[in-house]
Image (cartoon, rainbow, N blue to C red):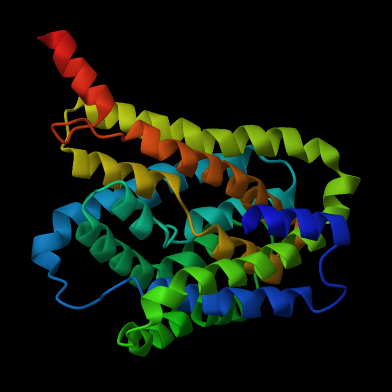
Amino acid sequence: MVASGLVVGFATGGFPSYSREISQLALAPRMTFAMTEISFANISAHTESRRFVVSLGASYGALSGLLLIFAFLSTDPGIHDGWVLMASVPPAIAVVPITSYLRGDTRRTVVSLAILYLIGLLLVPVITLAFTHQTVPLNDLVLQTILLIGLPMLASRPLRRWRKIADLRTSGVSISFFFLVIAIAGSTRGPLLARPELLLPLGLFSVLRTFGIGVLVVALGRTLRLPRDDQVALTVFASFKNLGLTVVLAFAVFGPISTLPSIVSLVCEILWLASLPLVFRRGQNGTSTLDSRRETTLR
């Protein structure tokens, strides 16, 4: 759906008018459907504190820190602010199904993600105001954060109790994301064609923020001999940001140019996602294939 949205958006120019409003309307149901995977029940700060700190460090420490470095290395103000916004948002909600697919500790991921989205209501405006070059309309930024995180979070609570929500979630998220990508890709077609030189640094930075940090975290986890569940958690939280939220916030607050880091990074995230089942392929004893080979070599 993302690939189709990119093709349609770049080919047609997206929607002729109201692109900002359409992107917001597309993201709201996507966030609502996706957040039905997050449970805030029975969260114990004492029990989950260590695991949460690790997830916080991976997402807002390692990944956000790298993104802020990219921001300072970017000479264009719009590109700079796009990286800053990406650093400010919580991880992608997709880390929950990704963790489940990789047979990691899904409950740990859900709990950590839930807490990160709660504090994201504060971190998004704080990080954005602290590191952007341009004068940020504070009221607009806070309003967008509430509309695109707070309201979907509230709306998702009663939907969690609906028995059929699991059957509709994937389709709802995919269709919403399709129209969101059309609106954003269409709006960035003009600026991108006018400044094609931006693609090379954006592509290099996006590969580093996804594959570079992802491979580094996997290697670190295996060097430290962390349990497989910890390796999966570190990798997903250090690799994936909520790029749908980022592009809509960037488009609404800073304009089309600032969405380009997220558009290019979105392609890299999809390619990294396709690689993860190979990275965490399980051996017969429940460990990854690479770990199994290492143990055989040591023996």
Q: Look at 57% across and 53% down and name the residue there.
A: 84
Say if 225 sits above or below 194 in the image.
above
The x, y position of residue 50, in whole percent, is 15, 53
Q: Look at 25% across and 39% down and name the residue there.
A: 231
Could you tell me if residue 253 is visible in this image?
no
The x, y position of residue 184, in whole percent, is 73, 63
Could you tell me if residue 30 is visible in this image?
yes
Farthest residue, direction bottom: 158
Could you tell me which quadrant the N terminus lies in?
bottom right
Say if 80 sits above or below 162 in the image.
above
Say if 207 sits above or below 13 in the image.
above
Picture quadrant of residue 82: bottom right
Q: Nearer the viewer, residue 36 or 151?
A: 36
Report how many numbered discs are placed on residues in the image: 0
Q: Look at 77% across and 39% down and name the residue there.
A: 198
- Residue 59 located left or right of residue 50: right
Picture quadrant of residue 27: bottom right
The x, y position of residue 186, in whole percent, is 80, 61
Say if 141 sits above or below 274 in the image.
below
The x, y position of residue 23, in whole percent, is 68, 73
Could you tell me which quadrant the C terminus lies in?
top left
Q: Look at 34% across and 85% down and name the residue there.
A: 157
Q: Nearer the viewer, residue 171 or 182?
A: 171
